[in-house]
Protein backbone atom coordinates (compact mmCIF):
# COMPACT_ATOMS: atom_id res chain seq x y z
CA UNK A 1 0.00 0.00 0.00
CA UNK A 2 2.67 2.53 1.04
CA UNK A 3 4.84 1.85 -1.98
CA UNK A 4 1.91 2.72 -4.22
CA UNK A 5 1.31 5.95 -2.36
CA UNK A 6 4.73 7.41 -3.09
CA UNK A 7 6.32 8.07 -6.48
CA UNK A 8 9.79 7.44 -5.12
CA UNK A 9 11.43 6.58 -1.82
CA UNK A 10 14.67 8.32 -0.88
CA UNK A 11 17.00 7.66 2.03
CA UNK A 12 19.78 9.89 3.29
CA UNK A 13 23.15 8.16 3.13
CA UNK A 14 23.81 8.71 6.84
CA UNK A 15 20.40 7.28 7.79
CA UNK A 16 20.74 4.12 5.69
CA UNK A 17 21.79 1.85 8.54
CA UNK A 18 19.51 3.30 11.21
CA UNK A 19 17.12 0.72 12.70
CA UNK A 20 14.26 3.20 12.22
CA UNK A 21 15.05 3.47 8.51
CA UNK A 22 15.14 -0.29 8.04
CA UNK A 23 11.86 -0.69 9.88
CA UNK A 24 10.10 1.87 7.68
CA UNK A 25 11.57 0.51 4.44
CA UNK A 26 10.33 -2.96 5.44
CA UNK A 27 6.87 -1.61 6.10
CA UNK A 28 6.90 0.28 2.82
CA UNK A 29 8.01 -2.82 0.94
CA UNK A 30 10.99 -0.96 -0.50
CA UNK A 31 14.26 -2.83 -0.98
CA UNK A 32 16.05 -0.44 -3.30
CA UNK A 33 15.56 3.18 -2.22
CA UNK A 34 17.31 6.06 -3.91
CA UNK A 35 20.23 7.20 -1.75
CA UNK A 36 20.73 10.96 -1.34
CA UNK A 37 23.19 13.12 0.57
CA UNK A 38 20.68 15.35 2.34
CA UNK A 39 16.89 15.33 2.57
CA UNK A 40 16.81 18.94 1.37
CA UNK A 41 18.24 17.82 -1.98
CA UNK A 42 14.74 16.51 -2.70
CA UNK A 43 12.44 18.07 -0.14
CA UNK A 44 13.39 21.67 -0.89
CA UNK A 45 13.05 21.39 -4.65
CA UNK A 46 9.82 22.75 -6.04
CA UNK A 47 8.12 20.53 -8.63
CA UNK A 48 7.98 22.07 -12.06
CA UNK A 49 4.30 21.08 -12.18
CA UNK A 50 3.20 22.56 -8.87
CA UNK A 51 2.55 20.08 -6.09
CA UNK A 52 2.48 16.96 -8.21
CA UNK A 53 5.56 15.13 -6.86
CA UNK A 54 4.90 12.90 -3.90
CA UNK A 55 7.94 11.15 -2.50
CA UNK A 56 8.87 9.63 0.83
CA UNK A 57 12.20 10.70 2.28
CA UNK A 58 13.84 9.02 5.27
CA UNK A 59 16.45 11.13 6.98
CA UNK A 60 18.13 12.13 10.20
CA UNK A 61 16.98 15.36 11.75
CA UNK A 62 19.92 17.76 11.45
CA UNK A 63 18.26 20.56 13.44
CA UNK A 64 16.08 21.04 16.46
CA UNK A 65 13.81 18.23 17.49
CA UNK A 66 11.52 20.22 19.75
CA UNK A 67 10.22 23.70 19.07
CA UNK A 68 8.30 25.98 21.39
CA UNK A 69 4.72 26.48 20.20
CA UNK A 70 3.93 29.54 18.07
CA UNK A 71 1.47 32.16 19.40
CA UNK A 72 -1.32 30.92 17.09
CA UNK A 73 -1.02 27.40 18.50
CA UNK A 74 -3.40 26.50 21.26
CA UNK A 75 -1.42 25.48 24.33
CA UNK A 76 -4.42 24.36 26.46
CA UNK A 77 -3.00 26.01 29.54
CA UNK A 78 0.32 24.19 29.36
CA UNK A 79 3.18 26.49 30.20
CA UNK A 80 5.89 24.43 28.52
CA UNK A 81 4.39 23.71 25.17
CA UNK A 82 6.43 22.20 22.33
CA UNK A 83 5.91 20.58 19.00
CA UNK A 84 7.99 17.86 17.46
CA UNK A 85 8.62 17.84 13.71
CA UNK A 86 9.42 14.13 13.55
CA UNK A 87 7.56 14.00 10.24
CA UNK A 88 7.34 16.92 7.83
CA UNK A 89 4.31 17.11 5.56
CA UNK A 90 1.08 15.19 5.36
CA UNK A 91 -0.62 12.59 3.17
CA UNK A 92 -3.82 14.61 3.38
CA UNK A 93 -4.36 17.63 1.17
CA UNK A 94 -6.22 20.27 3.19
CA UNK A 95 -6.45 23.47 1.22
CA UNK A 96 -6.08 25.68 4.29
CA UNK A 97 -3.15 23.84 5.85
CA UNK A 98 -0.18 25.98 6.88
CA UNK A 99 2.10 23.24 5.58
CA UNK A 100 1.23 24.43 2.06
CA UNK A 101 2.80 27.75 2.93
CA UNK A 102 5.65 26.23 4.89
CA UNK A 103 7.01 23.50 2.60
CA UNK A 104 7.81 23.75 -1.12
CA UNK A 105 6.03 20.57 -2.21
CA UNK A 106 4.15 17.46 -1.14
CA UNK A 107 7.07 15.17 -0.32
CA UNK A 108 6.90 13.59 3.11
CA UNK A 109 10.08 13.49 5.15
CA UNK A 110 10.26 11.13 8.12
CA UNK A 111 13.08 11.66 10.58
CA UNK A 112 14.04 8.17 11.61
CA UNK A 113 15.90 9.21 14.76
CA UNK A 114 12.91 9.64 17.05
CA UNK A 115 15.00 8.28 19.91
CA UNK A 116 17.08 11.47 19.73
CA UNK A 117 13.93 13.50 20.35
CA UNK A 118 13.23 11.36 23.37
CA UNK A 119 16.79 12.00 24.65
CA UNK A 120 16.16 15.77 24.41
CA UNK A 121 12.92 15.25 26.27
CA UNK A 122 14.77 13.42 29.05
CA UNK A 123 16.55 16.69 29.82
CA UNK A 124 13.45 18.86 29.56
CA UNK A 125 11.37 16.58 31.72
CA UNK A 126 13.95 16.92 34.49
CA UNK A 127 13.32 20.68 34.53
CA UNK A 128 9.53 20.92 34.15
CA UNK A 129 6.46 19.16 32.77
CA UNK A 130 6.47 19.17 28.99
CA UNK A 131 3.47 19.18 26.68
CA UNK A 132 4.35 18.03 23.18
CA UNK A 133 2.24 18.18 20.05
CA UNK A 134 3.65 15.18 18.24
CA UNK A 135 1.42 15.43 15.19
CA UNK A 136 1.91 19.06 14.37
CA UNK A 137 3.59 19.06 10.94
CA UNK A 138 1.78 15.96 9.74
CA UNK A 139 -1.06 13.58 10.56
CA UNK A 140 0.90 10.98 12.50
CA UNK A 141 -1.99 8.57 12.90
CA UNK A 142 -2.55 8.45 9.13
CA UNK A 143 1.08 7.29 8.78
CA UNK A 144 1.06 4.91 11.74
CA UNK A 145 1.38 1.69 9.74
CA UNK A 146 4.44 3.18 8.10
CA UNK A 147 6.21 4.81 11.06
CA UNK A 148 4.79 3.35 14.28
CA UNK A 149 5.41 6.77 15.89
CA UNK A 150 1.99 7.09 17.54
CA UNK A 151 2.71 3.87 19.43
CA UNK A 152 6.14 5.15 20.42
CA UNK A 153 4.78 8.47 21.69
CA UNK A 154 2.02 6.71 23.64
CA UNK A 155 4.56 4.39 25.20
CA UNK A 156 6.72 7.34 26.11
CA UNK A 157 3.82 9.25 27.70
CA UNK A 158 2.70 6.20 29.65
CA UNK A 159 6.14 5.83 31.22
CA UNK A 160 6.95 9.50 31.87
CA UNK A 161 4.88 11.44 34.38
CA UNK A 162 6.29 14.79 33.31
CA UNK A 163 5.27 14.39 29.70
CA UNK A 164 1.91 14.92 28.01
CA UNK A 165 1.51 14.26 24.32
CA UNK A 166 -1.18 15.43 21.93
CA UNK A 167 -1.75 13.42 18.75
CA UNK A 168 -3.97 15.48 16.47
CA UNK A 169 -5.61 13.68 13.56
CA UNK A 170 -8.34 13.46 10.97
CA UNK A 171 -7.73 9.74 10.53
CA UNK A 172 -10.68 7.36 10.77
CA UNK A 173 -8.92 4.17 11.72
CA UNK A 174 -10.45 2.48 14.75
CA UNK A 175 -8.39 -0.68 15.07
CA UNK A 176 -5.34 0.75 16.77
CA UNK A 177 -6.49 2.31 20.04
CA UNK A 178 -7.11 -0.92 21.93
CA UNK A 179 -3.50 -1.93 21.15
CA UNK A 180 -1.82 1.27 22.37
CA UNK A 181 -0.57 1.76 25.95
CA UNK A 182 -3.31 3.82 27.58
CA UNK A 183 -2.37 6.89 29.56
CA UNK A 184 -4.17 10.02 30.68
CA UNK A 185 -1.16 11.89 29.30
CA UNK A 186 -1.65 10.71 25.72
CA UNK A 187 -4.39 12.90 24.32
CA UNK A 188 -5.99 12.13 20.99
CA UNK A 189 -7.31 15.28 19.37
CA UNK A 190 -9.69 15.00 16.43
CA UNK A 191 -10.25 17.83 14.01
CA UNK A 192 -13.93 17.76 13.09
CA UNK A 193 -15.45 19.66 10.17
CA UNK A 194 -18.80 19.61 8.40
CA UNK A 195 -18.91 17.21 5.45
CA UNK A 196 -19.40 20.17 3.08
CA UNK A 197 -16.09 21.63 4.28
CA UNK A 198 -14.36 18.24 4.17
CA UNK A 199 -15.47 17.61 0.59
CA UNK A 200 -14.41 21.03 -0.61
CA UNK A 201 -11.28 21.78 1.38
CA UNK A 202 -9.94 18.65 3.13
CA UNK A 203 -9.11 16.42 0.18
CA UNK A 204 -8.20 12.83 0.96
CA UNK A 205 -9.43 12.99 4.54
CA UNK A 206 -12.15 10.83 6.07
CA UNK A 207 -15.66 12.23 6.29
CA UNK A 208 -17.12 13.34 9.63
CA UNK A 209 -18.77 9.99 10.37
CA UNK A 210 -15.45 8.16 10.04
CA UNK A 211 -13.67 10.62 12.32
CA UNK A 212 -16.47 10.19 14.86
CA UNK A 213 -15.98 6.42 14.82
CA UNK A 214 -12.27 6.88 15.47
CA UNK A 215 -12.94 9.39 18.26
CA UNK A 216 -15.28 6.93 19.97
CA UNK A 217 -12.76 4.11 19.57
CA UNK A 218 -10.08 6.21 21.26
CA UNK A 219 -12.44 7.17 24.07
CA UNK A 220 -13.65 3.58 24.55
CA UNK A 221 -10.04 2.44 24.84
CA UNK A 222 -9.60 4.87 27.74
CA UNK A 223 -7.68 7.73 26.12
CA UNK A 224 -8.56 11.36 26.83
CA UNK A 225 -10.09 12.80 23.67
CA UNK A 226 -10.09 16.38 22.51
CA UNK A 227 -12.44 17.69 19.84
CA UNK A 228 -11.14 20.53 17.68
CA UNK A 229 -13.66 22.54 15.73
CA UNK A 230 -10.68 24.29 14.33
CA UNK A 231 -10.17 25.74 11.83
CA UNK A 232 -13.73 26.85 11.16
CA UNK A 233 -13.94 28.06 7.57
CA UNK A 234 -16.04 31.01 6.49
CA UNK A 235 -18.11 30.10 3.43
CA UNK A 236 -21.62 30.76 2.19
CA UNK A 237 -24.15 28.86 4.38
CA UNK A 238 -21.53 28.27 7.09
CA UNK A 239 -24.14 28.43 9.83
CA UNK A 240 -26.17 25.59 8.31
CA UNK A 241 -23.06 23.47 7.85
CA UNK A 242 -21.73 23.94 11.37
CA UNK A 243 -25.19 23.55 12.95
CA UNK A 244 -25.67 20.21 11.17
CA UNK A 245 -22.23 19.14 12.30
CA UNK A 246 -23.07 20.00 15.92
CA UNK A 247 -26.11 17.71 15.62
CA UNK A 248 -24.06 14.86 14.21
CA UNK A 249 -21.34 15.22 16.82
CA UNK A 250 -23.72 15.57 19.77
CA UNK A 251 -25.72 12.54 18.62
CA UNK A 252 -22.61 10.53 17.84
CA UNK A 253 -20.70 10.78 21.10
CA UNK A 254 -21.00 11.71 24.75
CA UNK A 255 -19.70 15.27 24.68
CA UNK A 256 -19.59 15.47 28.47
CA UNK A 257 -17.03 12.63 28.46
CA UNK A 258 -14.70 14.44 26.06
CA UNK A 259 -11.66 15.96 27.79
CA UNK A 260 -12.14 19.35 26.16
CA UNK A 261 -13.40 21.06 23.04
CA UNK A 262 -11.46 23.68 21.19
CA UNK A 263 -13.05 26.16 18.81
CA UNK A 264 -11.13 28.40 16.43
CA UNK A 265 -11.41 30.04 13.06
CA UNK A 266 -8.78 29.90 10.33
CA UNK A 267 -5.64 31.95 10.99
CA UNK A 268 -2.17 31.80 9.52
CA UNK A 269 1.17 33.59 9.53
CA UNK A 270 1.54 36.31 6.91
CA UNK A 271 4.45 34.66 5.11
CA UNK A 272 2.65 31.32 4.79
CA UNK A 273 -0.45 33.05 3.41
CA UNK A 274 1.64 34.86 0.82
CA UNK A 275 3.09 31.52 -0.32
CA UNK A 276 -0.36 29.92 -0.40
CA UNK A 277 -1.82 32.74 -2.48
CA UNK A 278 0.90 32.24 -5.06
CA UNK A 279 0.42 28.48 -5.11
CA UNK A 280 -3.39 28.55 -5.10
CA UNK A 281 -4.69 31.57 -7.04
CA UNK A 282 -8.21 30.13 -7.17
CA UNK A 283 -8.51 29.08 -3.53
CA UNK A 284 -11.43 30.65 -1.72
CA UNK A 285 -9.58 30.20 1.56
CA UNK A 286 -6.20 31.55 0.49
CA UNK A 287 -7.67 34.52 -1.36
CA UNK A 288 -10.04 35.72 1.38
CA UNK A 289 -9.16 39.35 2.32
CA UNK A 290 -8.01 38.65 5.87
CA UNK A 291 -7.02 41.27 8.42
CA UNK A 292 -3.46 41.29 9.67
CA UNK A 293 -2.77 41.24 13.41
CA UNK A 294 0.78 40.97 14.72
CA UNK A 295 2.15 39.02 11.78
CA UNK A 296 -0.86 36.74 11.45
CA UNK A 297 -3.83 36.87 9.14
CA UNK A 298 -7.27 36.11 10.47
CA UNK A 299 -10.92 36.81 9.75
CA UNK A 300 -12.15 40.26 10.82
CA UNK A 301 -13.53 40.28 14.38
CA UNK A 302 -17.11 40.54 13.18
CA UNK A 303 -16.72 37.21 11.35
CA UNK A 304 -14.34 35.47 13.75
CA UNK A 305 -16.34 36.19 16.89
CA UNK A 306 -19.65 35.39 15.21
CA UNK A 307 -18.36 31.99 14.10
CA UNK A 308 -16.71 31.07 17.40
CA UNK A 309 -19.69 32.22 19.47
CA UNK A 310 -22.08 30.39 17.16
CA UNK A 311 -20.19 27.11 17.47
CA UNK A 312 -19.85 27.46 21.22
CA UNK A 313 -23.56 28.07 21.64
CA UNK A 314 -24.51 25.20 19.30
CA UNK A 315 -22.45 22.81 21.41
CA UNK A 316 -23.62 24.13 24.77
CA UNK A 317 -27.26 23.98 23.62
CA UNK A 318 -26.80 20.27 23.03
CA UNK A 319 -24.54 19.56 26.00
CA UNK A 320 -24.42 22.25 28.70
CA UNK A 321 -21.66 20.34 30.51
CA UNK A 322 -19.33 20.21 27.52
CA UNK A 323 -15.87 21.47 28.47
CA UNK A 324 -15.18 24.14 25.91
CA UNK A 325 -11.73 25.61 26.16
CA UNK A 326 -12.04 29.38 26.19
CA UNK A 327 -9.14 31.17 24.46
CA UNK A 328 -10.27 34.71 25.00
CA UNK B 1 -9.54 35.66 -18.51
CA UNK B 2 -10.48 35.69 -14.83
CA UNK B 3 -7.55 37.92 -13.98
CA UNK B 4 -8.70 40.30 -16.72
CA UNK B 5 -12.18 40.30 -15.21
CA UNK B 6 -10.71 41.23 -11.80
CA UNK B 7 -8.76 44.04 -13.43
CA UNK B 8 -11.84 45.40 -15.21
CA UNK B 9 -13.88 45.46 -12.00
CA UNK B 10 -10.98 47.04 -10.15
CA UNK B 11 -10.74 49.73 -12.82
CA UNK B 12 -14.46 50.46 -12.59
CA UNK B 13 -14.30 50.86 -8.81
CA UNK B 14 -11.04 52.83 -8.99
CA UNK B 15 -12.58 55.32 -11.42
CA UNK B 16 -15.16 56.18 -8.77
CA UNK B 17 -12.81 56.42 -5.80
CA UNK B 18 -9.59 58.10 -4.71
CA UNK B 19 -7.29 55.24 -3.84
CA UNK B 20 -3.78 55.04 -2.45
CA UNK B 21 -1.62 52.13 -3.58
CA UNK B 22 -2.36 50.31 -0.32
CA UNK B 23 -6.12 50.81 -0.70
CA UNK B 24 -5.88 49.63 -4.29
CA UNK B 25 -4.12 46.45 -3.14
CA UNK B 26 -6.89 45.81 -0.62
CA UNK B 27 -9.55 46.35 -3.24
CA UNK B 28 -7.76 44.06 -5.68
CA UNK B 29 -7.73 41.27 -3.09
CA UNK B 30 -11.46 41.80 -2.48
CA UNK B 31 -12.13 41.54 -6.22
CA UNK B 32 -10.16 38.29 -6.47
CA UNK B 33 -11.96 36.75 -3.50
CA UNK B 34 -15.37 37.95 -4.67
CA UNK B 35 -14.93 36.25 -8.03
CA UNK B 36 -13.87 32.95 -6.41
CA UNK B 37 -16.61 33.06 -3.77
CA UNK B 38 -19.30 33.94 -6.30
CA UNK B 39 -20.01 37.43 -4.99
CA UNK B 40 -21.36 39.81 -7.63
CA UNK B 41 -19.20 42.94 -7.47
CA UNK B 42 -21.46 44.77 -9.89
CA UNK B 43 -24.32 44.29 -7.40
CA UNK B 44 -22.05 45.57 -4.61
CA UNK B 45 -21.27 48.65 -6.69
CA UNK B 46 -24.94 49.27 -7.38
CA UNK B 47 -25.75 48.98 -3.67
CA UNK B 48 -23.08 51.54 -2.85
CA UNK B 49 -24.47 53.87 -5.51
CA UNK B 50 -27.96 53.47 -4.04
CA UNK B 51 -26.59 54.40 -0.61
CA UNK B 52 -24.84 57.45 -2.07
CA UNK B 53 -21.42 56.13 -1.02
CA UNK B 54 -20.14 55.86 -4.60
CA UNK B 55 -18.88 57.75 -6.45
CA UNK B 56 -16.64 59.61 -4.03
CA UNK B 57 -14.17 62.34 -4.76
CA UNK B 58 -11.94 62.41 -1.69
CA UNK B 59 -9.81 60.00 0.30
CA UNK B 60 -12.01 59.96 3.41
CA UNK B 61 -15.07 59.12 1.37
CA UNK B 62 -13.07 56.43 -0.39
CA UNK B 63 -11.97 54.91 2.91
CA UNK B 64 -15.61 54.67 3.93
CA UNK B 65 -16.50 53.15 0.56
CA UNK B 66 -13.69 50.63 0.87
CA UNK B 67 -14.88 49.53 4.29
CA UNK B 68 -18.44 49.18 2.93
CA UNK B 69 -17.16 47.05 0.06
CA UNK B 70 -15.23 44.95 2.58
CA UNK B 71 -18.38 44.40 4.63
CA UNK B 72 -20.23 43.18 1.52
CA UNK B 73 -17.44 40.98 0.26
CA UNK B 74 -15.85 39.59 3.41
CA UNK B 75 -18.60 39.58 6.01
CA UNK B 76 -21.94 38.98 4.33
CA UNK B 77 -22.37 35.17 4.42
Image (tube, helix red, strand yellow):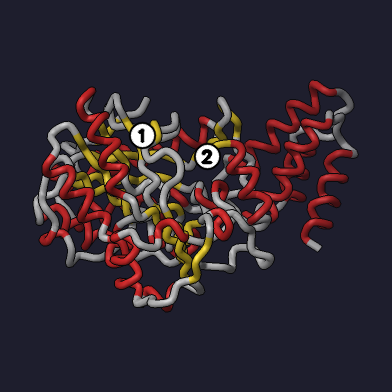
Question: From the viewer's perspective, is residue A69 above or below residue B44?
Answer: above
What label does residue A268 carry, if any?
2
Report the side of A129 relative to A158 (left or right): right
User: Marks 1 and 2, Cα distance to the nearest angstrom?
Assistant: 13 Å
Q: Quadrant of the C terminus of chain A?
A: top left
Is A13 or A122 nearer to us in this picture? A13
SS at mark 2? strand
- Residue A240 in view, yes or no: no
- Residue B32 in view, yes or no: yes
Please state the horizontal and vertical placement of residue A178, each as a whole percent of the image.
Answer: 11, 60
Question: From the viewer's perspective, is residue A19 above or below residue B76?
Answer: below
Report the side of A223 relative to B45 (left or right): left
Pointer 1 with pointer 2, Cβ within 8 A: no
Is A140 or A270 nearer to us in this picture? A140
Please state the horizontal and vertical placement of residue A130, each as a whole percent of the image.
Answer: 25, 31
Q: Chain of mark 1?
A: A
Q: How dense is the environment of label 1, judged by Cα within 10 Å: few (below 14), some, or many (20 and up)? A: some
Please state the horizontal and vertical placement of residue B7, each as a whole percent of the image.
Answer: 83, 50
- Quadrant of the rendered structure where residue A299 is? top right
Report the side of A328 relative to A176 (left or right): right
Circle 1 residue: A74
User: Which residue is depicted at the point 27% across and 27% down?
Assistant: A77
Amino acid sequence: MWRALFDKIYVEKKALDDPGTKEILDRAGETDPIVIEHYKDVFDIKSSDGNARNSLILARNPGRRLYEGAPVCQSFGNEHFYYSPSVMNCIYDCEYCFLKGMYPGRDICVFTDLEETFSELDELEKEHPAYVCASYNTDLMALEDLTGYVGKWCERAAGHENLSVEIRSKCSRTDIYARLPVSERAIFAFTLSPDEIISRFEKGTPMLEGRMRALNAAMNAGFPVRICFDPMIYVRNWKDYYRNMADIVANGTDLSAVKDISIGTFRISDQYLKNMRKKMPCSEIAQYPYVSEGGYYQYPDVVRLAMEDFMKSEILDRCPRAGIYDWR
Amino acid sequence: MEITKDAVILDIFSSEMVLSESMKRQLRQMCIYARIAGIDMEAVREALHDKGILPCTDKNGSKKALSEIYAYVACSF
